[in-house]
Image (tube, rainbow, N blue to C red):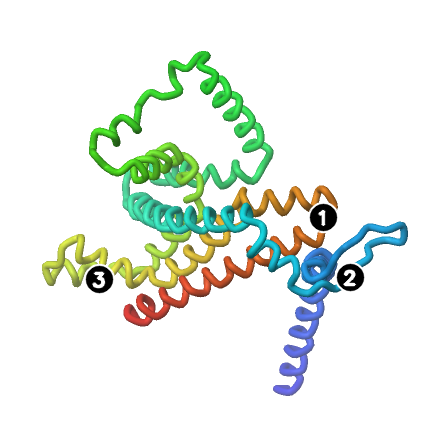
Amino acid sequence: MFKSKTKKHKGVEQLKSKYGRLFVLPWEIGLVLFFFIPIITSIQYAFSKVELTVEGFKTTWVGLEWFEYYLFKDANYFDELVASLSSFAVQIPIILSLSLILAIILNQKFAGRVVARAIFFLPVIIATGVVIEHMTAEWMTISLVASTGAENNYSSMIDFDAILGNLGLPEEINKLISGYIGDIFNLLWSCGIQIVLFIAGLQTIPDQLYEVSRVEGASKWEEFWYITIPMLGPTILLVMVYTMIDLFTQNKGVMESAFTLMKNAVYDKSSAMMWMYFLVVGALMALVLGLYNKFCLKKWS
């Protein structure tokens, strides 16, 4: 009797496993055809000279020629790469801090909390559709009108350059701060997923920890640094990875240059450009995550 039930249970599990493999089979085929094969092809193009002939693409092995070209001969690529990394070094801490602060606020119990959360997550939904293209076109039209001086009553309600100039700060710092104040709208639009992840992490922190801290007389500031931040360690790691990948893939400097070469059928140089960019980005991400794991996660655990 027992053997019969065990055999029947194994048969059901095998049937479920069979249906599961059949269900994911189209995704596996698509992954191979539309991801792995193009990746391997792009790696081959990065180390070759690609020529379009009557018979198709002809590749000639050139080794590291294209990588050396972009590292030592193409000054524009190096400048774009450095500018992108410098921009990300400032944007990532701002997005992480801003999303954490907003997540803590939205995690509080207040009337209309669900609506407030939906408002902050709405940009993520809008940015994935054709709505953002229409909004971008409208915004470019407004910016063009404002730059020509026509109907410019609303283009600069607050002159941040003048305000920062009165503080006596260096001109370089004034330009940096003014640029990020003007770009605050884009930074807010980049915090939707991060806010949701932080809220999910905050809700996993046991309330007993805060109750004990209040009994011990800890302040809110001490609770934040000694309870909230250490308990959010894995969540912060996840948010950091997502934010870095999101910013690096949205880079308009190197990525647009590579896509422009692709449109002009220059597949060898564009592939080398992209792979060099990914290698630098991967090394930077590994460095940041390694330092965070060594000096933060291990200390908090």
Residue extending furthest top?
A: 150
165 relative position to 265: left or right:
left
How far apart are the alpha carbons under marks 2 and 3?
Answer: 59 Å
Q: Is mark 1 on a helix, strand or loop?
A: loop
**Residue 86 appears in view:** yes
Q: Which label was assigned to residue 266?
A: 1
- The residue positioned 72% from the left and 48% from the top of the image is 266
Residue 74, percent from left and from top: 58, 50
Q: Which label was assigned to residue 226?
A: 3
In the image shown, does 211 or 89 lie closer to the viewer? Answer: 89
Q: Residue 158, located in which quarter of the rendered image?
A: top left
Asked if the residue under mark 1 is in contact with the one under mark 2, i.e. CB atoms within 8 Å, the reply is no
- Say how many tags the image has: 3
Q: Kindly identify which residue carries mark 2.
A: 60
Query: Which three-letter amino acid code belongs to the residue tagged 1?
Result: Val
How far apart are the alpha carbons under marks 2 and 1?
Answer: 14 Å
On screen, residue 211 above or below 259: below
Q: Is mark 2 on a helix, strand or loop?
A: strand
Check disc 1: other Cα within 10 Å, few if <14, some if 14-19, many if 20+: some
Residue extending furthest front?
A: 73
Mark 3 or 1, closer to the camera: 1
- The residue positioned 23% from the left and 37% from the top of the image is 169
Query: Which three-letter amino acid code belongs to the residue tagged 2?
Result: Thr
Asked if the residue under mark 3 is in contact with the one under mark 2, i.e. CB atoms within 8 Å, the reply is no
Q: Earlier in the sequence, mark 3 or mark 1?
A: 3
On screen, residue 170 above or below 239: above
How far apart are the alpha carbons under marks 3 and 1?
Answer: 54 Å
In the image shown, does 93 or 106 lie closer to the viewer? Answer: 93
Residue 207, percent from left and from top: 25, 59
Q: Is mark 3 on a helix, strand or loop?
A: helix
Mark 2 or 3, closer to the camera: 2
Q: Which of marks 2 and 1 is nearer the N terminus?
A: 2
